[in-house]
Image (tube, coloured by chain):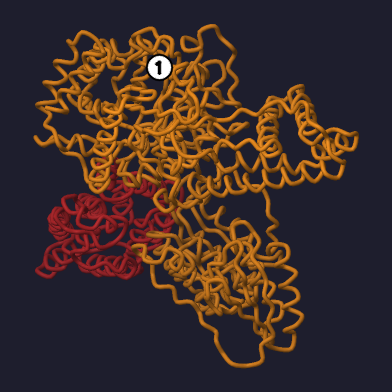
Amino acid sequence: MIGLVVVSHSRALAEAAVALAAEMSPDDGPALEVAAGLDEQTTGTDAVAIAEALGRADDASGGAGVLVLVDLGSAVLSAEMALEMVDPDVAARVVISPAPLVEGLIAATVAAGTGADLPTCATEAGRGLDAKASHLGDAPGATAPPTEEVDEPGDWDAVEVSVTGEHGLHARPASRLVSTAATAAPDTRVRVRNVTTGTGPVDALSLSGVATLGARQGHVLRVEASGERAEEVLGQIERLAATAFGDEPGPAQPLADAAAPAPSVSEEPGVAGSGLEAAMGPAVLDQTVPEPDDLVAGTEQEEQDRLDRAVGQALEALDQLCARARRHLGDGQAEVFEAHAALLRDPELLGDVGRRISAGEAAPLAWQQAVHEIAARFEALPDAYLQERAQDVRSVGERVMRVLLEVAEPEALGEGVLVVDELDPALAISLDAGAIQGVVTRHGGALGHGVLIARARGVPVLTGAGARADVEAGTLIAFDARAGRLEIDPAPEVQTAFSQMLERRAAERQQALADTHLPVVTRDGVRVTVKANVSSVAVARLGAGLGAEGSGLVRTEAVFAQWHRAPTVDQQVEVYSAIADAFDPHAVTIRTWDVGGDKPLDFIPIEEEANPFLGVRGIRAFRQDPALLLDQLEALCRVARSHRINVLFPMVTSLDDVDWARARLQEAARRIGLSAPPHQLGVGIMVEVPAVAVRLARLAQGLDVISIGSNDLSQYTLAAERGNPNVATWSDGLDPSVLQLIRLICDRAPEGVVVSLCGELASDPEVAGLLVGLGVRELSASPSAVPTIKARLRAVSLRELQDLAASAVTARDAAAVRDLLTLHIQG
Amino acid sequence: MADLTAFQSWIAACSESITTHADDLTELDRAIGDADHGSNMRRGLSACAALADQEDFSSIDAYLKKVGMTLVSTVGGASGPLYGTFFLRLAGPLAASEDVGSREFGQALRAGVEGIVARGKAEAGDKTMYDAFSPALEAFESAAGSGAGLAEALQAAADAAAQGRDATEPMVARKGRASYLGERSAGHQDPGATSATLLIEAAAKTLA
């Protein structure tokens, strides 16, 4: 069997690639030698080390030959040099492959494991890109997929098998198929075609060939074999297929987000919202579930059947929600539904309900009691993670109860404007944006996680409407989230005005979308950068697709909001890299954990406080124990080595905070063997505390970026909590005092420090221009607002925006500023 | 004429010069590469400069071969095998010499530069170290051919290398990491040509 040598600049990269390849090969796979990095940490290649690795691989191969996989640049030169250093007889048995490192290595490992010779393995490695090229089709740089057609006459036995694994015939199951087919080679040949897509046949010994079949879950494969052991090998493959090719369906990987395809919001109706931030339609009410009293139980069998049907229906609905969340929002979000489905399969819960039904209870009551009991048991547990499961149990309980009592589920409510108490993330993901034109919430602020998700989808949301939203189902509701305006049962002329406004916005948005990938230059030639605020990998891709030039704020606490345990450094590196990749080549600003206030994270406990917004939040939460912050900073240092990112510290108040944060960054850099944080890693602070604004010249000295958090800056300046609708009149971010502070910040920022604004103010297209007039040159907005903001800014000159800003800072109050904005837009 | 001690002074001077300019080299590399040329070269040449104290060398060629192998194992980037090959090949024609004159050094320099071409497959105008080495070799051979001594020929080579280095600025890179930048690589002096010039300038000061 041939040996393989991996040559890379990075030892970690090479070792990870080898580990990945080793998963593909049976226990007695080929020898995999590594010659990578100058040492564990220092990147580089060393011809002497490569020559030694060639010697080891040659010994292990018993003279069968050695294939060398290289990354780039000096790896190629050093490998060539190593060939000149080894014994010429050995050198004659070595081939340096031009294949891409990871793909080539995996293809070669599988081919070598089947006993293929050196030229065959080299060819297989070279074709390692085919599967991706074929999958991505016309993508730039993709080569045409030379699917290996193996259509030759002869006696072929055949079986048809289904692909049941949830990720289809991906690399690992495909390699198991190849290994199985290889057991009968060479005297028995095996080929495969994908009956569902009509691709193939391909040689079953070729991993790259099998990968080009594009076999997804639900596809049917026709496997054909010719030769003495045809029947035997087909039987083995049938048995393998029955176990989803050794990949029994399991729970989704929590990080599969990173590998999920970009959400294609335009493909499926009902996924993308209108993006108009306003809507008009009949009120749709979330029906509450009545108490299941006074029910007459049928026979035991009837009740059990009723329950089974309801559980079955609920499971089906969850499956659909899960698939949809995965398609459009990534696996992280899909996990919510998967966890719920797992509970519905819990034998303990189902057994308990069954016993209650046997005892004569009607199914709904039996279900309710069993759910309550299990939820209570979870709540009594000492582990916070398990306590949290009580909420999932209740949520699942309600879903089944809705089916049992025939109460519509919230995601299938009908058309119009949905009115709810609060918008939770699960509903925000699942609601059908084709039917639900907008959402009005009675409670909760504009920054809840569910609201952020809905906004990112372009679903208009008006929050905190209070008792005004207590309307009968079907009442006409019109609202404009930009202006904070809500009309219940509006008069015909108001309806007409609203319709016209919606039409105008729709036309403007269509135009804005067409131009959104162009940069913003004002009419008098001033460049403004418009970025997107990001709360998940999926939202990052959405933002990039909508023309955002990077992200000015990645809310890491939102990215990991669903997590019950702190993500590891590796997991964070994967997620942050995926987010940075989404915006490549633009830079991404990642904020460290901003916990406390209204943002709880399971894995960062914060003690309850009388005034959480004035308490331990942001970096204050890590002063006692910086362990989790250090992990995060380590991840950011690692990501910064290959991506353009900035780190942003939230809730900085004093110079001591800045020094402390920088010292922690330094400490994190040392953990990965660096003497200082990577120079590419920009460092910044949030400016959200007025104290920082006032002393900015001192506090921002030596930083790369500052980011104005206008939401918190408003609430701290105006002493009015942003999520509390009772003080909403005092917490308006357009108050001239806040605008003056923003101007002060722009004026006082030290030379060379980029001033960005990432609060909700930046997401309002009518306010964005005012901010530019105040001196802000970088805005980070909700992704769906990016196209409109860019279009608006292109149409104006800095000169007029400065005039507007000059009037706004001296206006009487926020309402007067709004009037000025309206005048400016109409004028 | 230059003996073993002179060659060791050369390498020490290279290390000193590269260390002095490491930040500039890294800055140049940051513009069009991966910002590691200065630190890579400093690491490599510091290791080479330390050789003279660690080991007694019997000949110039044994010393230069060790320098080449040390660069191969310590530089890390593409400059490792390139400069490593340069010194390994440079050693070849000097195998029998204890005191090197302009004719022998000319042969050695040609072998070294040809080694770089064979390793890196670069051509003139690709915006690489070859754009400094190539005019340097030409100037050296022309000066030596008209009777110049080692010091004079090396000074001509150093001047030509510096001109060659300056000429890389408007070039569009066609090799190495910088070639990913395409047209955007124009307007930046090539870090490899810059370090090559430093090595030849050090030679002009020490090998005489």
Q: Which chain is the one coloured red?
A: B
Chain hosting mark 1: A
Q: Quadrant of residue A238?
A: bottom right
Q: Is residue A19 left or right of residue A277?
A: right
For the question of whether residue A388 can be seen, the reply is: yes
In the shown orientation, is residue A429 left or right of residue A740?
right
Indicate the quadrant where residue A17 lies: bottom right
Chain displayed in orange: A
Q: Residue at x 39, y 36 (%)?
A: A678
Q: Secondary structure at mark 1?
A: loop
Residue A10 at x, y = what percent? 48, 51
Residue that badge 1 annotates: A652
Q: Is residue A595 above or below residue A57?
A: above
The residue sitting at the bottom extreme is: A154
Q: Is residue A527 above or below residue A324?
A: above
Give the quadrant of the C terminus of chain A.
top left
Between A123 and A539, the residue placed more toward the observer is A539
Nearer to the camera, A682 or A147: A147
The disc labelled 1 sits on which kind of residue? Val
